[in-house]
Amino acid sequence: MYKLIAIDMDGTLLREDKTISDKTKNMIKKAIEKGVKIVLASGRPIEGLERYLEELQLVTEDDFVMSFNGSIIQNVKTKAVISKNILKGRDLKVLYNLSKEIGVNIHAFTKQGCVTPSMNEYSQLEGRINGIEVHEIDFNTIDDEEDVIKVMFIDPEPILTAAIEKIPENVYKDFTIVRSAPYFLEFLNKASSKGTGVKALSEYLGIKREEVICIGDAGNDLDMIQFAGLGVAMGNAFEEVKAVADYVTLDNDSDGVAHVIEKFITIS
């Protein structure tokens, strides 16, 4: 029996209009009633998840959330942190210099929220998606020891793809690097990913790997889909995600998450 379902947000749980269908909400409710733990596993900051947690009624002391692609796992109600693996200001400066060398825009998440050295359309999009302010600051003023949760290279798909080809191999050794959207490339602490996050949470809860379902669509979902007892790719997922999944469900506009719950949690 499956006891935990980790669900990505954008392109998975959310339809293209960023809403959750009534059918999906109903299926999630039924899964919870059967004792299955539902965990939102997103690249978003916690601020970008709060309204969905409330909408799904995942706001008790028994509920957990995974934000920033597994960098932070916490109890929804108490805010107690279960796991935290983040970067530092010195890492941000390394990546900032790299961004200038390969010609891409950059932003990061610090104690100030979302910050960028040069305002651009994709940093503004980040702000709109998550309902947060984006601040333009000089990255050189950030202390080397300041906490930085994650760093992102952001630009239109052709520019970002060309820039990725210029990233030196040693950078991949120093950071977890995932492409969460055609226009978002994310840099995390090497110990962070959705896969390591789901593993840490399942161990904390005493849930076995084979009792876990993970559902996603993009590159940042790959390792949690590979970790899960049942790894599920959305019908709209990247081809490389479908290639490693145990099952491919319907797309995010066709209640793909609800279909998985109905099929594998055996709700009558």
Image (cartoon, grey):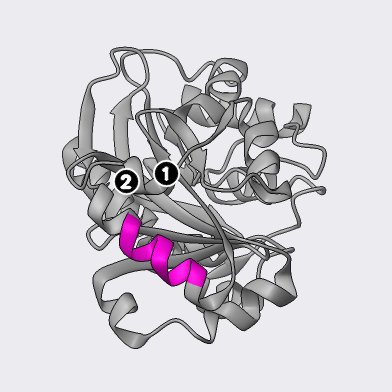
Q: Which numbered disc covers residue 71? A: 2
Residue 72 appears in which quarter of the rendering? top left
Taken as a whole, is the magenta stretch helix, strand or loop? helix
**Residue at horizontal 68 percent and vertical 26 percent from the top:** 26
**163 lies above or below 63:** below
219 relative to 177 in the view: left or right? right
The answer to which of 241 and 209 lies nearer the viewer is 241
Amino acid type, mark 2: Ser
- Contact, mark 1 vs mark 2 (Cβ under 8 Å): yes
**62 lies above or below 116:** above
Identify the residue under disc 1. Answer: 68
The answer to which of 77 and 84 lies nearer the viewer is 84
What is the secondary structure assignment of the residue under circle 2? loop
90 relative to 223 in the view: left or right? left
What is the secondary structure assignment of the residue under circle 1? helix
The answer to which of 30 and 70 lies nearer the viewer is 70
**Residue at horizontal 52 percent and vertical 47 percent from the top:** 117
- Mark 1 surroundings: few (<14), some (14-19) or many (≥20) residues within 10 A: many
- Asked if residue 98 is among those painted magenta in the image, a careful observer would answer yes
Residue 24 appears in which quarter of the rendering? top right
Instruction: Give percent across and percent down for residue 5.
Output: 45, 43
The answer to which of 46 and 230 lies nearer the viewer is 46
Distance, label 1 to label 2, CA atoms, is 5 Å
The answer to whether residue 109 is seen in the rendering is: yes
Amino acid type, mark 1: Phe
The answer to whether residue 49 is seen in the rendering is: no
**69 lies above or below 77:** below
Instruction: Give percent across and percent down for residue 101.
Output: 48, 76
Q: Quadrant of the C terminus?
A: top right
From which residue to which does the magenta span run? 93-100
94 relative to 112 in the view: left or right? left
Q: Which numbered disc covers residue 99? A: none
